[in-house]
Image: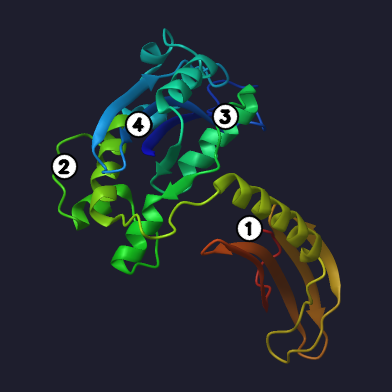
Amino acid sequence: MNYIIFDLEFNMFFRFKEGDLANPDLKNEIIQIGAVKLNDKLETISEFNSLIKPVIYKRLNPYVKRKTNINTSQVVPRRPFVETIKSFNTWMGNDAVLCSWGQDDILGLRENCLFFGFDALFFDKFINIQQIYMKFRGLTKQPSLESAVEGLEIEKSLPFHDALSDAVYTCDIFRKVYDDRTDAIINWEKVQIENELKIIELKSLLTQSDMRCPECEGLVQKHEEVTKTKKYFAFGFCTECNIPIRHVSRITNKNGEYSIVSINAINKRDEVSE
């Protein structure tokens, strides 16, 4: 079994001129894949590094350029995503475990594969190295890659926000904190599908939450309701306390568990701002 420690850099929508619109089906387009392949002894076998030609957001977002030091002229002559991901999948080989720092990159990789119609890459074996590091350190808040490098006193000899460099740093962390006797490998695809179904179920329950006055705890009738992606807002008036009430219910994720959290407060402004 080999471990594929990977990192991605993304481009995203930027309105360069009036009329430019984002593609709702692809928020983040991959422009670089960097990865390190380790054997079961956590020894480096080989590396993969490739810039990718963007075809949805063809000009690089100014923020992305500043953060990654990648510019449009560097990615234009490169191969598009489908050709690159085919090479990456072949390079990975059989019986490989995908590993990344946090969930953002594997979510982005899956999103790009779905968008571009590439279904040969499997997400059934995954390790979240950030989560392992958090358990190792006893942390409750998600740390950045750089803070973990500093916390483990790893030499900072490479630039951050370069996909291959970040993959190398993630490897260094992995070697220090991973214990193969634990159950760190999960079927990420299965978990993701279960989470998506859970979110759909919770969305249907958002509007059923009660609105209560924070002063007297009495039930308040809802006069106005607004539903967003994972949030539900309601407004009413407590006649007992003579105050306007604002209710917010949202779907939250804590340690991989999704649930609905509701807050009732005195409404001090007539707008939905969250």
CB within 8 Å, label 2 to label 3: no
Residue 242 sits in quarter: bottom right
CB within 8 Å, label 2 to label 1: no
Residue 131 sits in quarter: bottom left
Instruction: Decide which of tag 4 and tag 2 comes sooner along the chain.
Output: 4
Q: Nearer the viewer, mark 3 or mark 1?
A: 3
In the image, is 234 to the left or to the right of 89?
right
Instruction: Decide which of tag 4 and tag 3 comes sooner along the chain.
Output: 4
Instruction: Decide which of tag 2 and tag 3 comes sooner along the chain.
Output: 3
CB within 8 Å, label 4 to label 2: no
- The CA distance from mark 3 to mark 1 is 31 Å
Q: Neighbour class for label 3 at 10 Å: few (<14), some, many (≥20)? A: many
For the N terminus, give its image quadrant: top left
Q: Neighbour class for label 2 at 10 Å: few (<14), some, many (≥20)? A: few
Instruction: Kindly identify the residue that appears in the image at 65 percent across and 54 percent down.
Output: 195
- For badge 3, the amino acid type reads Asn
Looking at the rendered structure, the secondary structure element under dot 4 is strand
- The CA distance from mark 2 to mark 3 is 30 Å
Instruction: Tell me the tag on residue 273.
Output: 1
In the foreground, 90 or 72: 90
Instruction: Kindly identify the residue that appears in the image at 51 percent across and 17 percent down.
Output: 58
